[in-house]
Protein backbone atom coordinates (compact mmCIF):
# COMPACT_ATOMS: atom_id res chain seq x y z
CA UNK A 1 0.00 0.00 0.00
CA UNK A 2 1.35 3.47 -0.93
CA UNK A 3 2.27 5.57 2.09
CA UNK A 4 -0.26 8.12 3.29
CA UNK A 5 0.37 11.80 2.53
CA UNK A 6 0.21 13.93 5.70
CA UNK A 7 -2.37 16.71 5.22
CA UNK A 8 -2.27 20.26 6.59
CA UNK A 9 -4.67 23.17 6.94
CA UNK A 10 -3.07 25.99 4.94
CA UNK A 11 -5.72 28.69 5.36
CA UNK A 12 -9.04 29.46 7.01
CA UNK A 13 -11.87 31.92 6.44
CA UNK A 14 -15.13 32.94 8.03
CA UNK A 15 -18.11 35.03 7.05
CA UNK A 16 -21.04 36.18 9.19
CA UNK A 17 -23.83 37.88 7.20
CA UNK A 18 -24.89 41.43 8.08
CA UNK A 19 -28.33 41.19 9.71
CA UNK A 20 -27.97 41.10 13.53
CA UNK A 21 -30.89 39.47 15.36
CA UNK A 22 -30.73 40.04 19.11
CA UNK A 23 -32.67 38.14 21.77
CA UNK A 24 -34.80 41.27 22.18
CA UNK A 25 -35.84 40.95 18.52
CA UNK A 26 -37.18 37.47 19.37
CA UNK A 27 -39.08 38.83 22.38
CA UNK A 28 -41.25 40.63 19.80
CA UNK A 29 -41.92 37.40 17.87
CA UNK A 30 -42.48 34.69 20.49
CA UNK A 31 -43.08 34.30 24.24
CA UNK A 32 -39.44 34.37 25.32
CA UNK A 33 -36.95 36.65 27.07
CA UNK A 34 -33.33 37.68 26.71
CA UNK A 35 -32.74 36.28 30.21
CA UNK A 36 -34.14 32.81 29.35
CA UNK A 37 -32.15 32.57 26.11
CA UNK A 38 -28.87 33.70 27.69
CA UNK A 39 -29.25 31.40 30.71
CA UNK A 40 -30.37 28.30 28.79
CA UNK A 41 -28.17 28.64 25.68
CA UNK A 42 -25.49 31.35 26.07
CA UNK A 43 -26.77 33.04 22.90
CA UNK A 44 -27.07 36.86 22.89
CA UNK A 45 -27.40 37.47 19.16
CA UNK A 46 -27.09 35.67 15.85
CA UNK A 47 -26.68 36.76 12.22
CA UNK A 48 -29.20 36.26 9.45
CA UNK A 49 -28.43 36.43 5.73
CA UNK A 50 -29.77 39.46 3.84
CA UNK A 51 -32.75 38.83 1.56
CA UNK A 52 -30.52 38.58 -1.53
CA UNK A 53 -27.97 36.22 0.08
CA UNK A 54 -28.07 32.42 -0.04
CA UNK A 55 -25.61 29.83 1.27
CA UNK A 56 -23.26 29.99 -1.74
CA UNK A 57 -22.90 33.77 -1.24
CA UNK A 58 -21.73 33.23 2.34
CA UNK A 59 -19.40 30.45 1.13
CA UNK A 60 -17.83 32.74 -1.46
CA UNK A 61 -16.70 35.27 1.17
CA UNK A 62 -15.27 32.63 3.55
CA UNK A 63 -13.61 30.76 0.66
CA UNK A 64 -11.86 33.85 -0.71
CA UNK A 65 -10.41 34.56 2.75
CA UNK A 66 -9.16 30.98 3.20
CA UNK A 67 -7.64 30.90 -0.31
CA UNK A 68 -5.86 34.22 0.29
CA UNK A 69 -4.41 32.98 3.61
CA UNK A 70 -3.27 29.73 1.94
CA UNK A 71 -1.93 31.64 -1.10
CA UNK A 72 -3.84 29.28 -3.38
CA UNK A 73 -5.35 30.41 -6.70
CA UNK A 74 -8.86 28.98 -7.30
CA UNK A 75 -7.54 27.41 -10.52
CA UNK A 76 -5.20 25.24 -8.43
CA UNK A 77 -8.10 23.61 -6.57
CA UNK A 78 -8.75 19.94 -7.33
CA UNK A 79 -11.89 19.63 -5.23
CA UNK A 80 -14.50 21.69 -3.38
CA UNK A 81 -16.65 20.05 -0.67
CA UNK A 82 -19.39 21.97 1.14
CA UNK A 83 -21.07 20.59 4.25
CA UNK A 84 -24.55 22.13 4.42
CA UNK A 85 -28.15 21.28 5.19
CA UNK A 86 -29.38 24.50 3.58
CA UNK A 87 -27.97 24.59 0.03
CA UNK A 88 -29.24 27.31 -2.35
CA UNK A 89 -31.15 24.65 -4.30
CA UNK A 90 -31.90 20.97 -3.80
CA UNK A 91 -30.28 20.64 -7.22
CA UNK A 92 -27.54 21.43 -8.20
CA UNK A 93 -25.15 21.46 -5.25
CA UNK A 94 -23.94 24.54 -3.40
CA UNK A 95 -20.37 23.42 -4.20
CA UNK A 96 -21.03 23.60 -7.95
CA UNK A 97 -22.35 27.16 -7.60
CA UNK A 98 -19.29 28.08 -5.55
CA UNK A 99 -16.96 26.44 -8.09
CA UNK A 100 -18.37 28.72 -10.82
CA UNK A 101 -18.26 31.86 -8.65
CA UNK A 102 -14.62 31.21 -7.73
CA UNK A 103 -13.57 30.29 -11.27
CA UNK A 104 -12.15 27.03 -9.90
CA UNK A 105 -12.11 25.54 -13.39
CA UNK A 106 -10.05 22.47 -12.46
CA UNK A 107 -12.03 21.43 -9.40
CA UNK A 108 -14.63 18.73 -8.85
CA UNK A 109 -17.43 19.77 -6.52
CA UNK A 110 -19.99 18.09 -4.30
CA UNK A 111 -21.91 18.71 -1.06
CA UNK A 112 -22.05 16.48 1.97
CA UNK A 113 -25.18 16.13 4.07
CA UNK A 114 -24.28 15.56 7.71
CA UNK A 115 -26.03 18.53 9.37
CA UNK A 116 -23.92 20.03 12.18
CA UNK A 117 -21.18 17.46 11.44
CA UNK A 118 -21.04 18.83 7.85
CA UNK A 119 -17.75 20.68 8.12
CA UNK A 120 -15.94 17.82 9.83
CA UNK A 121 -17.34 15.43 7.20
CA UNK A 122 -16.07 17.73 4.42
CA UNK A 123 -12.69 18.00 6.17
CA UNK A 124 -12.47 14.21 6.59
CA UNK A 125 -13.32 13.78 2.89
CA UNK A 126 -10.79 16.37 1.68
CA UNK A 127 -8.11 14.95 3.95
CA UNK A 128 -8.77 11.45 2.57
CA UNK A 129 -8.44 12.61 -1.06
CA UNK A 130 -5.08 14.28 -0.39
CA UNK A 131 -3.83 11.47 1.87
CA UNK A 132 -4.56 8.96 -0.90
CA UNK A 133 -2.74 11.08 -3.50
CA UNK A 134 -5.98 11.83 -5.41
CA UNK A 135 -5.84 15.61 -4.91
CA UNK A 136 -3.37 18.30 -3.85
CA UNK A 137 -5.54 21.33 -3.08
CA UNK A 138 -8.99 20.93 -1.53
CA UNK A 139 -11.36 23.65 -0.32
CA UNK A 140 -13.75 22.51 2.42
CA UNK A 141 -16.57 24.52 3.95
CA UNK A 142 -19.39 24.39 6.46
CA UNK A 143 -22.12 26.90 5.61
CA UNK A 144 -25.77 27.52 6.38
CA UNK A 145 -28.72 29.83 5.83
CA UNK A 146 -30.79 28.27 8.60
CA UNK A 147 -32.91 31.41 8.97
CA UNK A 148 -34.85 30.33 5.86
CA UNK A 149 -36.05 27.16 7.61
CA UNK A 150 -37.02 28.49 11.05
CA UNK A 151 -40.57 28.54 12.30
CA UNK A 152 -40.65 32.05 13.77
CA UNK A 153 -43.65 31.04 15.90
CA UNK A 154 -41.86 28.11 17.59
CA UNK A 155 -39.89 29.45 20.55
CA UNK A 156 -38.24 26.08 21.20
CA UNK A 157 -36.29 26.23 17.92
CA UNK A 158 -36.25 29.70 16.33
CA UNK A 159 -34.04 31.31 18.99
CA UNK A 160 -31.25 28.78 18.58
CA UNK A 161 -29.97 29.17 15.04
CA UNK A 162 -28.04 31.61 12.86
CA UNK A 163 -26.45 31.88 9.41
CA UNK A 164 -22.76 31.85 8.48
CA UNK A 165 -19.93 30.15 6.63
CA UNK A 166 -16.45 28.89 7.48
CA UNK A 167 -13.78 27.53 5.14
CA UNK A 168 -10.41 25.78 5.14
CA UNK A 169 -7.89 25.05 2.40
CA UNK A 170 -6.14 21.68 2.67
CA UNK A 171 -2.85 20.67 1.02
CA UNK A 172 0.03 18.24 1.70
CA UNK A 173 1.52 19.18 5.07
CA UNK A 174 5.06 19.24 3.73
CA UNK A 175 4.01 22.16 1.49
CA UNK A 176 2.14 24.33 4.01
CA UNK A 177 3.87 23.22 7.24
CA UNK A 178 0.80 24.14 9.29
CA UNK A 179 -2.23 22.46 10.84
CA UNK A 180 -1.25 18.82 10.37
CA UNK A 181 -4.35 16.63 10.60
CA UNK A 182 -3.41 13.78 12.94
CA UNK A 183 -6.74 12.03 13.48
CA UNK A 184 -10.27 12.13 12.11
CA UNK A 185 -13.32 10.13 13.04
CA UNK A 186 -16.93 10.07 11.83
CA UNK A 187 -19.92 8.22 13.22
CA UNK A 188 -23.69 7.96 12.79
CA UNK A 189 -26.82 6.48 14.36
CA UNK A 190 -29.80 6.88 12.04
CA UNK A 191 -32.10 5.44 14.73
CA UNK A 192 -32.15 8.98 16.05
CA UNK A 193 -33.31 10.49 12.73
CA UNK A 194 -36.22 12.37 14.29
CA UNK A 195 -34.25 14.07 17.09
CA UNK A 196 -33.63 16.99 14.69
CA UNK A 197 -35.34 16.98 11.32
CA UNK A 198 -37.08 18.76 8.46
CA UNK A 199 -39.87 16.48 7.23
CA UNK A 200 -40.92 18.31 4.13
CA UNK A 201 -39.38 19.08 0.76
CA UNK A 202 -37.72 15.71 0.08
CA UNK A 203 -38.94 12.51 -1.58
CA UNK A 204 -40.82 11.32 1.52
CA UNK A 205 -42.98 14.43 1.93
CA UNK A 206 -42.65 16.35 -1.35
CA UNK A 207 -43.44 20.05 -1.21
CA UNK A 208 -47.15 20.77 -1.54
CA UNK A 209 -49.55 23.46 -0.36
CA UNK A 210 -50.53 21.09 2.50
CA UNK A 211 -46.95 20.36 3.60
CA UNK A 212 -46.12 24.06 3.63
CA UNK A 213 -49.31 24.86 5.56
CA UNK A 214 -48.28 22.23 8.16
CA UNK A 215 -44.82 23.83 8.41
CA UNK A 216 -43.10 20.59 7.37
CA UNK A 217 -40.27 22.57 5.79
CA UNK A 218 -39.19 23.99 9.16
CA UNK A 219 -36.49 22.57 11.45
CA UNK A 220 -38.00 20.68 14.40
CA UNK A 221 -36.08 19.26 17.29
CA UNK A 222 -36.43 17.30 20.49
CA UNK A 223 -34.18 19.63 22.43
CA UNK A 224 -34.00 17.78 25.74
CA UNK A 225 -33.09 14.44 24.12
CA UNK A 226 -30.47 16.12 21.94
CA UNK A 227 -29.10 17.80 25.06
CA UNK A 228 -28.59 14.46 26.84
CA UNK A 229 -27.02 12.79 23.79
CA UNK A 230 -24.83 15.81 23.09
CA UNK A 231 -23.15 16.08 26.50
CA UNK A 232 -22.00 12.45 26.51
CA UNK A 233 -21.02 12.41 22.84
CA UNK A 234 -19.05 15.65 23.05
CA UNK A 235 -17.12 14.47 26.12
CA UNK A 236 -16.42 11.05 24.54
CA UNK A 237 -15.21 12.58 21.26
CA UNK A 238 -12.86 15.03 22.98
CA UNK A 239 -11.46 12.17 25.08
CA UNK A 240 -11.05 9.93 22.01
CA UNK A 241 -9.26 12.64 20.02
CA UNK A 242 -6.79 13.38 22.84
CA UNK A 243 -6.09 9.78 23.82
CA UNK A 244 -2.37 9.02 24.10
CA UNK A 245 -1.31 12.69 24.15
CA UNK A 246 -0.07 14.56 27.21
CA UNK A 247 -2.65 17.14 28.39
CA UNK A 248 0.10 19.80 28.31
CA UNK A 249 0.18 19.47 24.50
CA UNK A 250 -3.44 20.59 24.17
CA UNK A 251 -3.84 24.13 22.85
CA UNK A 252 -7.58 24.48 22.26
CA UNK A 253 -10.82 22.56 21.89
CA UNK A 254 -13.11 24.03 19.21
CA UNK A 255 -16.50 22.38 19.77
CA UNK A 256 -19.73 22.64 17.80
CA UNK A 257 -21.42 25.77 19.18
CA UNK A 258 -24.65 24.04 20.11
CA UNK A 259 -25.38 25.42 23.58
CA UNK A 260 -23.05 26.96 26.17
CA UNK A 261 -24.49 24.61 28.83
CA UNK A 262 -23.90 21.50 26.70
CA UNK A 263 -20.28 22.53 26.14
CA UNK A 264 -19.73 23.28 29.84
CA UNK A 265 -21.38 20.02 30.95
CA UNK A 266 -19.22 17.99 28.52
CA UNK A 267 -16.04 19.72 29.69
CA UNK A 268 -17.10 19.19 33.32
CA UNK A 269 -17.69 15.48 32.60
CA UNK A 270 -14.05 15.28 31.50
CA UNK A 271 -12.99 17.04 34.70
CA UNK A 272 -11.47 19.87 32.65
CA UNK A 273 -11.82 23.64 32.96
CA UNK A 274 -13.14 25.92 30.21
CA UNK A 275 -9.77 27.76 29.73
CA UNK A 276 -8.85 25.69 26.70
CA UNK A 277 -12.30 25.65 25.12
CA UNK A 278 -13.35 28.19 22.51
CA UNK A 279 -16.91 29.51 22.66
CA UNK A 280 -18.47 32.21 20.45
CA UNK A 281 -22.10 31.08 20.55
CA UNK A 282 -23.01 34.40 22.22
CA UNK A 283 -22.42 36.23 18.91
CA UNK A 284 -23.58 33.74 16.27
CA UNK A 285 -25.90 31.16 17.85
CA UNK A 286 -25.84 27.68 16.36
CA UNK A 287 -24.87 27.94 12.67
CA UNK A 288 -24.84 24.13 12.30
CA UNK A 289 -22.08 23.07 9.86
CA UNK A 290 -20.49 26.53 10.05
CA UNK A 291 -19.85 26.71 13.81
CA UNK A 292 -16.53 24.83 13.94
CA UNK A 293 -14.75 26.54 11.00
CA UNK A 294 -16.05 29.99 12.03
CA UNK A 295 -14.89 29.45 15.62
CA UNK A 296 -11.53 28.05 14.51
CA UNK A 297 -10.88 31.04 12.25
CA UNK A 298 -11.83 33.45 15.03
CA UNK A 299 -9.61 31.63 17.55
CA UNK A 300 -6.68 31.92 15.13
CA UNK A 301 -7.36 35.63 14.61
CA UNK A 302 -7.40 36.14 18.39
CA UNK A 303 -4.05 34.36 18.75
CA UNK A 304 -5.67 31.64 20.91
CA UNK A 305 -3.79 28.83 19.11
CA UNK A 306 -0.08 28.46 19.72
CA UNK A 307 2.13 26.97 17.00
CA UNK A 308 2.86 23.30 17.70
CA UNK A 309 -0.07 22.79 20.10
CA UNK A 310 -2.94 20.37 19.53
CA UNK A 311 -6.38 21.57 18.45
CA UNK A 312 -9.46 19.36 18.79
CA UNK A 313 -12.61 19.82 16.68
CA UNK A 314 -15.79 18.00 17.73
CA UNK A 315 -19.31 18.15 16.32
CA UNK A 316 -22.56 16.18 16.25
CA UNK A 317 -25.98 16.79 14.84
CA UNK A 318 -28.98 15.55 12.91
CA UNK A 319 -28.78 12.05 11.58
CA UNK A 320 -27.63 11.50 14.23
CA UNK A 321 -24.07 12.11 13.05
CA UNK A 322 -20.85 13.03 14.82
CA UNK A 323 -17.20 13.68 14.08
CA UNK A 324 -13.88 14.61 15.63
CA UNK A 325 -10.55 15.86 14.31
CA UNK A 326 -7.16 16.33 15.95
CA UNK A 327 -4.78 18.87 14.43
CA UNK A 328 -1.27 19.95 15.37
CA UNK A 329 -1.19 23.67 14.62
O1 LIG B 1 -26.97 21.35 16.85
C1 LIG B 1 -28.02 20.47 17.11
C2 LIG B 1 -29.34 21.22 17.18
N1 LIG B 1 -29.54 21.81 18.49
C3 LIG B 1 -30.31 21.22 19.39
O2 LIG B 1 -30.86 20.17 19.15
C4 LIG B 1 -30.49 21.92 20.72
C5 LIG B 1 -30.12 21.04 21.91
N2 LIG B 1 -30.95 21.36 23.07
C6 LIG B 1 -30.81 22.52 23.75
O3 LIG B 1 -29.94 23.33 23.46
C7 LIG B 1 -31.77 22.78 24.90
O4 LIG B 1 -32.47 21.57 25.19
C8 LIG B 1 -32.79 23.91 24.58
C9 LIG B 1 -32.09 25.26 24.60
C10 LIG B 1 -33.45 23.67 23.24
C11 LIG B 1 -33.88 23.95 25.65
O5 LIG B 1 -33.29 24.12 26.95
P1 LIG B 1 -33.76 23.19 28.15
O6 LIG B 1 -33.06 23.65 29.35
O7 LIG B 1 -33.55 21.75 27.72
O8 LIG B 1 -35.27 23.57 28.29
P2 LIG B 1 -36.55 22.60 28.18
O9 LIG B 1 -36.75 22.12 26.80
O10 LIG B 1 -36.46 21.60 29.28
O11 LIG B 1 -37.72 23.63 28.50
C12 LIG B 1 -37.86 24.24 29.79
C13 LIG B 1 -39.03 25.20 29.73
C14 LIG B 1 -40.27 24.60 29.09
O12 LIG B 1 -41.39 25.08 29.79
P3 LIG B 1 -42.15 24.15 30.87
O13 LIG B 1 -42.57 22.92 30.11
O14 LIG B 1 -41.12 23.87 31.93
O15 LIG B 1 -43.26 25.02 31.33
C15 LIG B 1 -40.28 25.19 27.71
O16 LIG B 1 -41.57 25.29 27.15
O17 LIG B 1 -38.68 26.33 28.93
C16 LIG B 1 -39.70 26.56 27.94
N3 LIG B 1 -39.09 27.15 26.77
C17 LIG B 1 -38.88 28.48 26.65
N4 LIG B 1 -39.15 29.51 27.46
C18 LIG B 1 -38.80 30.74 27.04
C19 LIG B 1 -38.61 26.53 25.66
N5 LIG B 1 -38.10 27.43 24.79
C20 LIG B 1 -38.27 28.65 25.38
C21 LIG B 1 -37.93 29.97 25.00
N6 LIG B 1 -38.22 30.97 25.86
N7 LIG B 1 -37.33 30.23 23.82
Image (cartoon, rainbow, N blue to C red):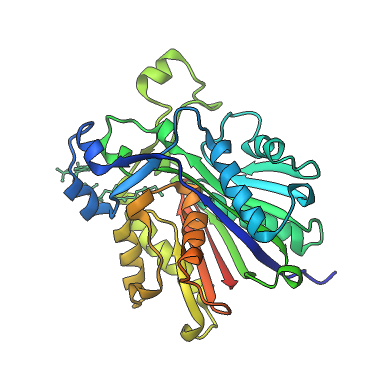
**Which residue reaches farthest right?**
2
Give coordinates of residue 25: x percent, y percent.
25, 37
Is 54 situated left or right of 219 in this image? right
Q: Quadrant of residue 17?
A: top left
- Judge by depth and name the residue closer to the eye, 63 or 27: 63
**Image height of 234 relative to 287, above or below:** below
The answer to whether one can see residue 127 in this image is no
Q: Quadrant of residue 135?
A: bottom right
Give the residue drawn at x 33%, y 43%.
222
Give the residue drawn at x 35%, y 70%.
267
Quadrant containing the N terminus in the rendered view: bottom right
Give coordinates of residue 249: x percent, y percent.
51, 83
- Judge by depth and name the residue closer to the eye, 1 or 138: 138
Is 327 situated left or right of 227 in this image? right
Q: Quadrant of residue 282?
A: bottom left
The answer to whether one can see residue 43 in this image is yes
**Image height of 294 relative to 105, above or below:** below
Give the residue drawn at x 33%, y 50%.
225
**How many numbered marks are there?**
0
Give coordinates of residue 24: x percent, y percent.
22, 40
- Judge by depth and name the residue closer to the eye, 324 or 77: 77
- Judge by depth and name the residue closer to the eye, 20 or 126: 20
Is 34 situated left or right of 169 in this image? left
Give the residue drawn at x 52%, y 21%.
206
Give coordinates of residue 76: x percent, y percent.
79, 51
Quadrant containing the C terminus in the rendered view: bottom right
Amino acid sequence: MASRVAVGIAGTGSFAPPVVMTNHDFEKLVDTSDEWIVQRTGIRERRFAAADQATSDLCLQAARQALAMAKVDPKELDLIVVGTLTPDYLLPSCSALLQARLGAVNAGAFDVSAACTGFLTALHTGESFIAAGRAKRVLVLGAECLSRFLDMQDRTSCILFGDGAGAAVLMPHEECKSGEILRTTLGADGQGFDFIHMRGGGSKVPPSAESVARGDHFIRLRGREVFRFAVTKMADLIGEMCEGYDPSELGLVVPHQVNQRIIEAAVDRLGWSMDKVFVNIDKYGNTSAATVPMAFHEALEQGRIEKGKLVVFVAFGAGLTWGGTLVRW
